[in-house]
Image: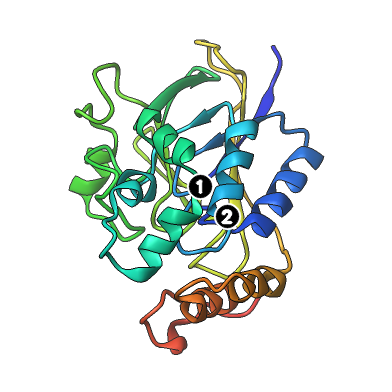
C-alpha cells in the first residue's frame, strides 16, 4: 500500500508567479501528480504562460467558466475580456473546448469527483455559506458529471474561498485560489493524500497549503504589459477583497 499526494490547483487567473511558488512548494512536499480545476486565464496578465505551464504539468485539467466563455468573447466585448482573449494563442483557445467538465478518481476507497464550480454548471456558484440543497446538489449525477456512483468526496474551485466540510460521510472541499485568493491574499492549494486507484479503505487526508510569493512583482507585470483593469487586479492581490467590495471587508492580517 503506497500513499501518494496529489496537488489540486484552481483559479490561477494568469498569475504565473503564484503558480510557480505553489508548484515549487508542492514538489518540496513530495507531490508528483498535479490536477487543475480550471480558470487558468482572465483577470491576470499571463494567461498564455499559465496555460502552457498547466498543460505541461497537470495530469488532468477540467474546464472552468473562464475557459468556457472567454474564447467566444466578441470583438466589441468588454475591453479587458478582449485583451485576455487575444493574449491567448488560437491553439490554446481550441484546447479549452476539449477539456472535460469533471473527472472522477478513486483514492483510498473514496470516490473523488473534481469539477470547477458545481455539478450543475461551470457558471453556477456554490459558496461557503451554501444551503443544504446546494450541498446535496454538489454530489448529484448531472449532465455535467455524467452517470455513475455518487462520490464521497467532491473537490471544486471557482469561489476563491478555501474550506473543508464533512457531513454524514460526504466531504466537500474548495481548493481556494492559486492566483487570485479572496479569503486572504495568500495563494492556496489543496493536497489529497491516499492510495490511488484502491477500492479498499486506507489512510486519507485533505490539507490546504498557503504559499507566500512576490505579489508586487506580478502586479508590475500587469502594468508593464498594459493590461486593462490592472488597478482592480492589484487591489485584489494586495487585499484579498473582491473588486467592488469595500476594503473594510478585507480579511484580518495573518
Q: Foreground residue, 184 or 136?
A: 184
Residue 164: horizontal and vertical position, in percent?
Answer: 47, 48
Residue under the point 50% across and 17% down: 109
Q: How many marks?
A: 2
Q: Foreground residue, 201 or 157?
A: 157
175 versus 77 height, above or below: above
Q: Is residue 206 visible?
A: no
Residue under the point 38% across and 32% down: 169
Q: Foreground residue, 210 or 213?
A: 213
Residue 95: horizontal and vertical position, in percent?
Answer: 44, 33
Query: Do residues under tags 1 and 2 come within 8 Å of each other at their CB atoms?
Result: yes
Q: Foreground residue, 250 or 69?
A: 69
- Residue 90 figure quarter: top left
The residue to which callout 2 is attached is 178
Residue 184: horizontal and vertical position, in percent?
Answer: 55, 70
Q: Secondary structure at mark 2?
A: loop
34 versus 25 height, above or below: above
User: How far apart are labels 1 and 2 at the CA level?
Assistant: 6 Å
Q: Quadrant of the N terminus?
A: top right
**Mark number, residue 10:** 1
Rate crowding at label 1 as few (under 14), some (14 to 19) or many (20 or more) other CA atoms within 10 Å: many
Residue 112 left/right relative to 25 = left
Q: Quadrant of the C terminus?
A: bottom right
Residue under the point 40% across and 30% down: 99
Q: Is residue 81 visible?
A: yes
Amino acid at each position: 500500500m503506497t500513499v501518494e499526494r496529489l496537488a489540486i490547483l484552481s483559479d490561477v487567473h494568469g498569475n504565473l508567479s503564484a503558480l510557480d511558488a505553489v508548484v515549487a512548494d508542492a514538489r518540496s512536499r513530495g507531490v508528483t501528480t498535479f490536477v487543475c480545476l480550471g480558470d487558468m486565464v482572465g483577470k491576470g496578465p499571463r494567461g498564455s504562460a499559465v496555460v502552457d505551464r498547466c498543460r505541461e504539468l497537470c495530469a488532468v485539467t477540467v474546464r472552468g467558466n473562464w475557459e468556457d466563455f472567454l474564447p467566444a468573447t466578441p470583438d466589441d466585448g468588454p475591453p479587458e475580456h478582449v485583451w485576455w482573449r487575444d493574449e491567448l494563442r488560437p491553439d490554446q483557445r481550441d484546447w479549452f473546448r476539449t477539456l472535460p467538465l469533471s473527472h472522477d478518481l478513486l483514492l483510498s476507497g473514496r470516490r473523488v469527483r473534481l469539477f470547477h464550480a458545481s455539478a450543475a454548471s461551470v457558471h453556477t456558484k456554490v459558496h461557503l455559506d451554501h444551503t443544504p440543497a446546494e450541498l446535496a446538489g454538489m454530489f448529484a449525477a448531472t449532465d455535467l458529471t455524467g452517470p455513475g456512483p455518487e462520490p464521497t468526496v467532491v473537490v471544486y474551485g471557482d469561489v476563491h474561498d478555501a474550506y473543508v466540510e464533512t457531513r454524514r460521510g460526504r466531504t466537500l472541499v474548495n481548493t481556494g485560489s492559486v492566483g487570485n485568493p479572496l479569503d486572504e491574499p495568500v495563494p492556496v492549494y489543496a493536497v489529497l493524500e491516499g492510495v490511488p486507484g484502491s477500492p479498499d479503505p486506507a489512510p486519507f487526508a485533505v490539507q490546504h497549503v498557503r504559499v507566500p510569493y512576490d505579489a508586487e512583482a506580478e502586479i508590475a507585470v500587469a502594468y508593464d504589459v498594459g493590461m486593462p483593469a490592472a488597478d482592480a487586479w492589484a487591489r485584489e492581490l494586495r487585499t484579498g477583497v473582491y473588486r467592488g467590495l469595500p476594503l473594510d471587508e478585507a480579511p484580518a492580517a495573518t
